[in-house]
Image (cartoon, rainbow, N blue to C red):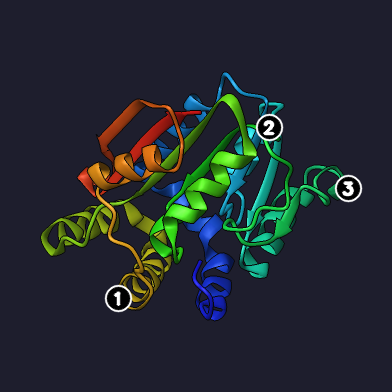
């Protein structure tokens, strides 16, 4: 999240948890990210939002941490999980903070995930270098993000999303409105799969072990890199 976007992300967090899990495109991406995390125990959700990935990893017994620049997102995460587990189990592990300045020791995590975040982070290369620092040798970064702006692709994806909405059409329409505002006003970085691959290597990761460019009707890429 970029500085100055607090209001839009706080507003988004209130409906994010309700709507996204109903979307097949989201569930496919989530399943692939969680699957890539399976070899690892201590995992950072960097830009965790309201905790949809954090929650799945926690349920699988992972030692998961979360950080997000928006306090509303962190509060949504705690409320979502707090109804089912003692809040003290995660209280110290989910924090408001900047992924460009992680408050963790070197080599602290086995892996980190960063899903649909980097496009909205000023100086994304430094964010990747900071994630590299916090991941142990042999660990991994699992990262996903939107392709560069593509009006026709976005139009087709929006149509498909609304076809899935059913009883949640109003909620999905609202989320799409917020997404459009984010993309128009706060889309800091246009990052293709090729560009993120180059940035990952420049940040210090040793090799790319997995890529997928088919998600969200080819509007989202997914990549795994090892340190």
Tell me the element at label 1.
Answer: helix
Mark nearest the camera among 1 and 3 is: 1
Percent of width and height locating residue 148: 22, 57
Residue 52 appears in the rendering: no
Q: Alpha carbon of mark 2 to alpha carbon of mark 3: how far?
A: 16 Å
Q: Where 198 falls versus 208 (above or below)?
A: below
Checking the image for residue 59, the label placed there is 2
Q: How many marks?
A: 3
Q: Residue placed at 47% from the left, 57% from the top?
A: 19
Graded by Cα atoms within 10 Å as few (under 14), some (14 to 19) or many (20 or more), the crowding at tag 2 reads few
Q: Alpha carbon of mark 1 to alpha carbon of mark 2: how far?
A: 35 Å
Please give left or right for residue 171 compared with residue 184 in the image: right
Percent of width and height locating residue 110: 63, 28
Percent of width and height locating residue 85: 81, 42
Graded by Cα atoms within 10 Å as few (under 14), some (14 to 19) or many (20 or more), the crowding at tag 1 reads few
Please give left or right for residue 140 compared with residue 97 in the image: left
Quadrant of the rendered image containing residue 25: top left
Query: On the image, numbered disc 3 is attached to which residue?
Result: 88
Reading the chain from its start, which is encountered first: label 1 or label 2? 2
Reading the chain from its start, which is encountered first: label 1 or label 3? 3
Q: Alpha carbon of mark 1 to alpha carbon of mark 3: how far?
A: 39 Å
Q: Please name whichever residue, 188 or 166, is drawn nearer the observer in this view of the structure.
A: 188
Query: On the image, numbered disc 1 is attached to which residue?
Result: 184
Graded by Cα atoms within 10 Å as few (under 14), some (14 to 19) or many (20 or more), the crowding at tag 3 reads few
Q: Where 216 falls versus 17 (above or below)?
A: above
Q: Are marks 1 and 2 in contact (CB under 8 Å)?
A: no
Tell me the element at label 2.
Answer: helix
């Amino acid at each position: 999240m970029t500085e100055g976007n607090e209001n839009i992300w706080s507003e988004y967090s209130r409906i994010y948890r309700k709507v996204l899990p109903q979307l097949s495109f989201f569930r496919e991406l989530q399943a692939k990210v969680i699957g890539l995390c399976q070899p690892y125990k201590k995992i950072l959700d960097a830009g965790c939002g309201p905790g949809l990935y954090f929650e799945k990893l926690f349920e699988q017994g992972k030692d998961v941490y979360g950080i997000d620049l928006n306090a509303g997102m962190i509060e949504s995460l705690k409320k979502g999980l707090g109804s089912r587990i003692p809040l003290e189990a995660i209280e110290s592990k989910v924090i408001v903070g900047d992924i460009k300045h992680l408050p963790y020791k070197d080599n602290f995590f086995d892996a980190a995930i960063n899903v649909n975040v980097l496009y909205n982070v000023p100086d994304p290369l430094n964010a990747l270098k900071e994630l590299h620092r916090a991941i142990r040798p042999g660990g991994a970064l699992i990262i996903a993000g939107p392709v560069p702006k593509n009006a026709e692709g976005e139009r087709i994806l929006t149509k498909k999303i609304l076809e899935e909405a059913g009883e949640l059409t109003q909620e999905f329409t609202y989320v799409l409105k917020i997404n459009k505002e984010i993309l128009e006003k706060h889309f800091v970085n246009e990052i293709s799969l090729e560009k993120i691959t180059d940035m990952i290597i420049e940040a210090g990761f040793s090799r790319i072990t997995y890529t997928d460019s088919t998600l969200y009707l080819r509007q989202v890429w997914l990549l795994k890199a090892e340190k």
